[in-house]
Amino acid sequence: AFGATGAGMIGYRMMRRTAQIKDFAFDLIDSSEGLPVTICVAGWLLDDADTCWGVWDTAMRDVDGDGGDTYALRWESSELRRMGKVLTEYVTQQAKGYATTIIGTAVVGTAFGLLNLPRAIIGLTDMIDNTWALCQVRSDLAGAHLAGLLVDRIQGHRPVTLVGYGMGARVVLQCLLTLVEMGEKGLGIVETAVCLGTPYPASGKIWDKASRACAHRLVNGYCTSDLILGIVFRAKNWRYSVAGLRAVETELKEGKNPILENVNLTGTVKGHWDYREKLPEVLARVGLSSGVASGGPRPGS
């Protein structure tokens, strides 16, 4: 009655380029007893030997969940490797002293002001800008494509958990927004979604909308000292605050959204680069089951 996911998801390959997406597939990480399907989405890769499967195979090894099948979403691997390369170069520049003097100041976080940054810091965005912009476009396309596959029940009639970091978190959020826009057929599919260091506006309206696609939880994991996300996102979206840097406040008339959770990961991670390296610790804090995150109570509870 619930359908089998093995042949559908493992066997899925894009038969043609869909909406400019060149690389999109599912790689099985683990199969165990349980009903849920967990789909993990990477935000960058390090080099040619690095894979989306490798990132999540390590990260998910000791994570407590609800069992079932766990997949790594393989998406736009070439672009993710370019992203990893420029992030590595950027972090190296920070280590040389350009940005380390301001990491602990108020320029990062909810009060982040681009014009207050030294000219040398702003200049470093040239390293990332083009690659970041392209990945952002591709992540939105990948999220919409994933939503279409879920509505087509490639996973069978089984509850879905989505988790992503960086641009992978943007894929997850865009998937949720697309599911909501699909109407009734897009609802009742996703149980839990976890977004870590998300390069997306911290708009209550947007996140409230996305939460409608989740039966139990939508988690915004953020770090107030995420310098990379602060600089690059704000350089392109200067009118908006970014969800990966702060809590998202609901705009529902009731004043609370029982689905939306904010988990402050500052300390567990020091910045954007840390999300990948600290995935086991981050996921242990946030949790991938349908229970309340250990990072604190639900807003309004």
Image: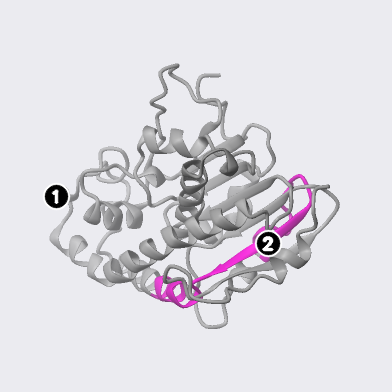
**Residue 66: quarter of image:** top right
Nearer-the-camera pick, 212 or 18: 18
Q: Earlier in the sequence, mark 2 or mark 1?
A: 2
- Dot 2 alpha-carbon crowd within 10 angstroms: few under 14, some 14 to 19, many 20 or more: many
At 35% from the left and 37% from the top, the residue drawn is 203
Mark 2 lies on residue:
71
**Any magenta on residue 77?**
yes
Instruction: Indicate the amino acid at tag 1.
Output: Leu
**Residue at the extreme top of the image, as rendered:** 254
At 21% from the left and 61% from the top, the residue drawn is 121
In the rendered image, residue 222, in percent from the top left (x then y), is placed at 45, 44
Please give the count of numbered marks on the rendered protein: 2
Mark 2 secondary-structure assignment: strand
At 37% from the left and 48% from the top, the residue drawn is 200
Nearer-the-camera pick, 119 or 255: 255
Instruction: Indicate the amino acid at tag 2.
Output: Tyr
**Which image quarter holds the C terminus?**
top right
Magenta span of residues: 57-85
Q: How far is the residue under mark 2 from the one under mark 1?
A: 42 Å
Q: Report whether residue 268 is seen.
A: no
Mark 1 lies on residue:
115
